[in-house]
Amino acid sequence: MSNWISRNLNIAWLILAIVAISFTGFFAVVISFARIPAFSVFFSATYFYRALCVHVVFAMIIWLMMFTVCMWHQYVPEARSRFDTMAFLFALISCVLIASLGFINLGESYLNDYLPVISHPVFWIGIMLFFISFILSISKFLPYSKKLIQKNTEGQLVVFSMIVSIVMIAAGVISYFITEQIADNKLYFLRIFWVPGHIQQFLNAFILLLSWHLLVRKSNPDFSEGLQLNTWIKIANAVLLLSIVPILFGFFVDPVSPAFKLLTIFSYGVGLGVPVLIHTIFLIRKVKFGNFAGNTFLFSVILYYTGIFIAYGGMKSDLRITAHYHGVVAALTVALMGVTYFILKKNNILKYEKLARIQPTIFSIGMIVLILCLFFAGYYGAPRKTFGFNWIVNKSVLSDLNFLAIGATLSVSGGMLFIFYSVSSLFKIRTRQKTVLLISVIALISCSFQTPNENNFLGKQVANIRVFNSKAESFFLYDLIKNKPTILSPVYTKCPHSCSVITSNLKSVVDEMGGLGTNFQVITFSFDTTDAVTDLKTFGERWKLDETNWNIVSANGNDIKKLLSSIDFDIEWNNDAEQYDHPNLVVMVTPTGKISRYIYGITPKVHDLNISVIEARNEQTSVGVFDGLYIRCFAWDPVSKTFILDSSFITEVAISFVTMVAILFYFVRLYWKK
């Protein structure tokens, strides 16, 4: 194996990059469908945030930086080191370790910018091995810098990308040692990765330009020697390189302060934006469209400037930022997909060439649709990094998020085609093995559509915390359960929408059932640490709740965390909406305090609650009742303060479903014909 790696370094690192983008694509499927209202009921918030962390790490860090090493090998194929095998194995192990955290519930997820973190040793070992691998790879290319920088534009871009890589890694090490540990882990990690994360965007810019030059050169035979170093290009490259200097001032001030954020925005807008624009103008004049290389370059440019225009148009902390990132990263990704085609062709191992030629088009169209849906959803108030839909105040956002299914399907289909033809070219795989691989991928994706962690929590004891009620009396929770089946309803009294709806509907159903206090009881539990006795009393009076058999309670911060953790109920404060994002459900608890059943949605049914009470009385457990798809057929009307039938949503879901089936049928048919 060691000999093969040393002889085929460009192919070896291409294999690693394909592995990385495979994981990127898999977790992209998960989080895309988790953000689509019609499918979101199949995901838990915990899994959504974990999958999002892993997806971003692979998409923003591992995939791009692995392909960076692969690109360097294209320009310096003779570069060798005694650490080549070690670097390759470290990178491979890091992929496996980080990807495993997307399937195993270890550590806590922190969705800070640039490098999201899963706070667990497995994650840190994986990240450490990856960057050691990257450092070992850089070291062997540096002796060739003088030769490359004097060659042409592409050679200079290679050298400058190496310089930025070294500065980025050094900045990461310095940030780690100078950043003071604080109680807020999310802010702590954000400060560590803010400076190196911003520098990495300049590395991505150099690799994007390098890919564009290669694609334009392939599209135009008259451009075979590459763009020579004229004055404007030299200035553009120098400005792009020197624009990382202002970012280094983040070592001397708080890197997340408003003043420093303005400085980084200026570095991006001028120091990065203008040089890329100069390159774009020169390349547009040289490219020839109508062929694979030219068309791939065109799609990459469209995606890039879509993301850039979103940024220049002004963004708030919502899905418009996500749309911007996806535009820029997808531009680089589609360019690297085009480069992969030529690497495979150069090594005479390209298979399914016709499929390979249409793949970037499918991927790019899907990403454009996805980016536009994210942009308009953000415009209507959809927050980033947020699971669920409790923040919705304008039902137009549901339309955008459901059309996102079309973009996600196309882009994922394009990504799967890329992986399919790349893997088929890199490895000798028989038709039967390809079929098994395809079925395995589908099965793996299907595993993500699970009832939220019920297998881990059904039958487990609810935390017996100390609570207080609206009369300022203090009890242990089990004192209130009193050996009766209990409906536990987690809400908070200041909730502007769903909590009141859940409580109102639950009261109507309980009144219809009868038997409150005899057959079962209800505990409404507020998870808001600011809810005081007066808030609980006001809430009970508003809904005319019987506070003998329907207790309204809360607890201190630590006890709230214990209870929510014991029932796997995830909440997150949304600063933009100034409210909690949380699931809509009630939990049926047995007389001995065990979780018997989860009942999802805002409108529990009499039949379901009656069965749940019987099961709980007999200490039985049962898989939750899913009303999610039904619930999504209704939208909140802030005028009438009720949920109304959303006919446009139903139509859009039907169109999305038919489109996805048609696309899937087309590619399956194409595959079997092949």
Image (cartoon, helix red, strand yellow):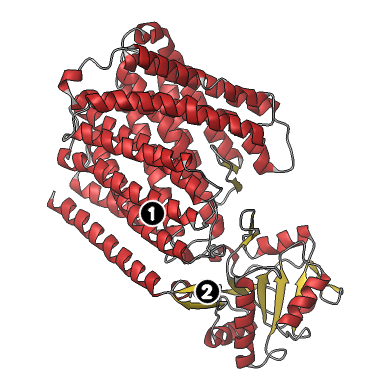
Q: Which of marks 2 and 1 is nearer the N terminus?
A: 1
Q: Where is residue 46 in the image (x, y as percent from the top left)?
A: 56, 56
- Amino acid type indicated by mark 1: Leu
Instruction: Please give left or right for residue 595 compared with residue 405 in the image.
Output: right
Q: Where is residue 503 in the image (x, y as percent from the top left)?
A: 64, 78
Mark 2 and mark 1: Cα distance apart in space: 38 Å
Kindly identify the residue that appears in the image at 78 percent across and 85 percent down.
Answer: 548
Q: Name the residue under label 1.
A: 444
Kindly identify the residue that appears in the image at 32 percent across and 35 percent down.
Answer: 301
| Depicted 319 relative to depicted 634: above or below | above
Kindly identify the residue that appears in the image at 58 percent across and 35 percent down.
Answer: 124
Badge 2 vs badge 1, beta-carbon distance below 8 Å: no
Q: Name the residue under label 2.
A: 637
* Residue 498 in view, yes or no: yes
Q: Where is residue 285 in the image (x, y as percent from the top left)?
A: 24, 25
Disc ID at residue 163: none
Find numbered disc 1 in the image and state the secondary structure of the residue it sits on. helix
- Amino acid type indicated by mark 2: Asp
